[in-house]
């Protein structure tokens, strides 16, 4: 089925001027960027977004990184978009990511891993709603 997923191009991507290069991989995979905005995430926004990880030892580092520079928040649309985007991103740890994936190609560490993608349909809906209004998405 046609689905929507939520994506973030993280500060390591924007800092290295890789927005277009990452978007090219996304589009080549057949995913359509139907919503996109470049923002500076606040600490409160990052803490809310990563709430499920708030007990992890890397939580503070994660929030600090995600607020260390601009991010590009996106809504991606396509056939099985949620699973497909996770495949295109590659494993969380770039050292374990498959050839040709975004993280294998661009990421330097598990913390600074270039992209985020929703892990389920339920989270995709919640995450999209946290950053987008319906009027800012055009499929
Ligand atoms: P993301 O998919 O955005 O969701 C949680 C994030 O936590 C994950 O990507 C990583 O960037 C980050 N993360 C996971 N494991 C570690 C770790 N061991 N150290 C630092 N950050 C991590």
Image (cartoon, rainbow, N blue to C red):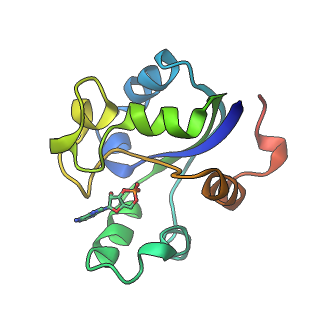
Q: Quadrant of residue 115?
A: top left
Q: Is residue 131 left or right of residue 66?
A: right
Residue 93: give x, y in percent of width and height.
23, 49
Q: Residue at x 55, y 18 (%)?
A: 30
Residue 98: give x, y in percent of width and height.
24, 31
Q: Quadrant of the N terminus?
A: top right
User: Quadrant holding ligand 1?
Assistant: bottom left
Residue 84: give x, y in percent of width and height.
50, 32
Q: Is residue 110 left or right of residue 60?
A: left
Question: Where is 72 relative to 31, above or below?
Answer: below
Residue 96: give x, y in percent of width and height.
18, 42
Q: Is residue 77 left or right of residue 87?
A: right
Count of number-bearing discs: 0
Q: Residue at x 40, y 49 (%)?
A: 10
Q: Quadrant of the C terminus?
A: top right
Q: Find the residue positioned furthest to the right.
A: 135
Q: Residue at x 39, y 56 (%)?
A: 69
């Amino acid at each position: 089925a046609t689905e929507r997923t939520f994506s973030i191009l993280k500060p390591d991507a924007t800092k290295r001027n890789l927005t277009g290069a990452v978007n090219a991989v996304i589009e080549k995979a057949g995913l359509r960027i139907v919503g996109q905005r470049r923002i500076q995430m606040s600490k409160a926004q990052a803490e809310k977004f990563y709430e499920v990880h708030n007990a992890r030892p890397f939580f503070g580092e994660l929030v600090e990184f995600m607020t260390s520079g601009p991010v590009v928040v996106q809504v991606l649309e396509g056939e099985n978009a949620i699973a497909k985007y996770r495949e295109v991103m590659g494993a969380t740890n770039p050292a374990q990511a498959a050839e040709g994936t975004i993280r294998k190609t661009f990421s330097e560490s598990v913390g600074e891993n270039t992209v985020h993608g929703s892990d389920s349909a339920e989270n995709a809906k919640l995450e999209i709603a946290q950053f987008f209004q319906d009027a800012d998405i055009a499929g």
